Amino acid sequence: MTDDSQRRPIIIDTDPGQDDAVAILLALASPELEVLGITAVAGNVPLPLTEKNARKVCELAGRPDMPVYAGASRPLMRPLVTAEYVHGKTGLDGPELPEPTMPLQDKHAVDFIVETLLEREAGTVTLCPLGPLTNIALALIRAPEIATRIREIVLMGGGFFEGGNTTPAAEFNIYVDPHAAQTVLDAGIPLTMIPLDCTHKALTTAKRLAAIRAIGTPVAEAVAALLGFFERFDETKYGTDGGPLHDPCVIAYLLKPELFSGRHVNVVVETGSELTMGMTVVDWWRVTDRSVNATVIRDVNAEGFFDLVTERLATL
Ligand code: RIB
Ligand code: CA
């Protein structure tokens, strides 16, 4: 058993979302991690649903004690764009999950992020954004002094050689709030970006989904139903066996970084042109003199990743 002194404290910022849900379950199933709280942001579906969905997932994991906070209801500058066409109208279509009974915290998510970073020992807390970066950017704008207190930001977002999934150029999380993404990239915080180039190699194939279903627990059955719904859009779009399991890659990276590989490069977000709005311009071949501001992950050992996810889900 991992004692508290060795557990890595994290805050998950999320817009559940079926893949967010699996990421939250993976984190709650992993004793190496201490989830200090879950902050919800508008993204896949509007904030009233993302915060409720986060509470539904905590209760599914048997963790009604986990504090869930509501954050930004829209991006910094742009109107909210949602993705019911992928996630369904509830954002967690697939299984029938009961309405949550655990309360939503009164405190705003941004206040929780700032206060936690100021109270906790500097350099110990990792932020794990799984949706648009609005809450993280607002926290940095409100309290710039937290930037040097963050151990690392490990986020799912962006794409480069793989292009975009929301426009030809932009991935959803960055597209929804490109200004927030650039604010976070400008903050000088150790940052690892897990883009579509990586997550599109982590497909929920029929074999992998069957292995999760075979666990046979209520959590596993719910996850199989979540992913069975979630994958259909991308299977049709890409003609693949299964869809990309985006957000759990963030948590898996914390647990087994050896499953992933990438390089330290410069990333800039398009915030001017509507044609390429939200594009993450990744200088992978270092053709500019722009300074390194991110570790960008390009590859994942997909078998190892799904073995980890399946093994941990079986413990819930
Ligand atoms: O583009 C994939 C990302 O957008 C994932 O985080 C998914 O949950 C959606 O938020
Ligand atoms: Ca997400």
Image: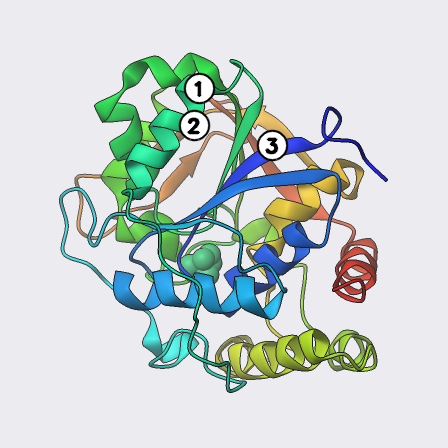
Is label 2 in a helix, a strand or a loop? helix
User: Do we see residue 143 in this rendering?
Assistant: yes
* Kind of element beneath mark 1: helix
Q: Is mark 2 within 8 Å of ligand 2?
A: no
- Residue 253 in percent (x, y) is at 68, 41
Distance of label 3 from label 1 (alpha carbons): 13 Å
> Can I make out residue 44 in this image?
no
Under circle 3, the secondary element is strand
Q: Where is ligand 2, by quadrant?
A: bottom left
Q: Which residue is mark 1?
A: 119
Left or right, 93 with reference to 222: left
Q: Which residue is mark 3?
A: 9
Q: Is residue 313 left or right of residue 133?
A: right
Q: Residue 24 versus residue 173: which sits nearer the camera?
A: 24
Q: Give the residue type at disc 2.
A: Thr
| Sequence-wise first label, 3 or 2 | 3
Tell me the residue at 29%/17% (across/down).
144
Q: CA distance from mark 2 to mark 1?
A: 5 Å
Quarter the C terminus occupies: bottom right
Point out residue 90 in the picture as x, y percentages from the top left corner: 36, 78
Q: Is residue 271 above or below residue 51?
A: above
Q: Which quadrant of the structure image shows residue 10?
A: top right
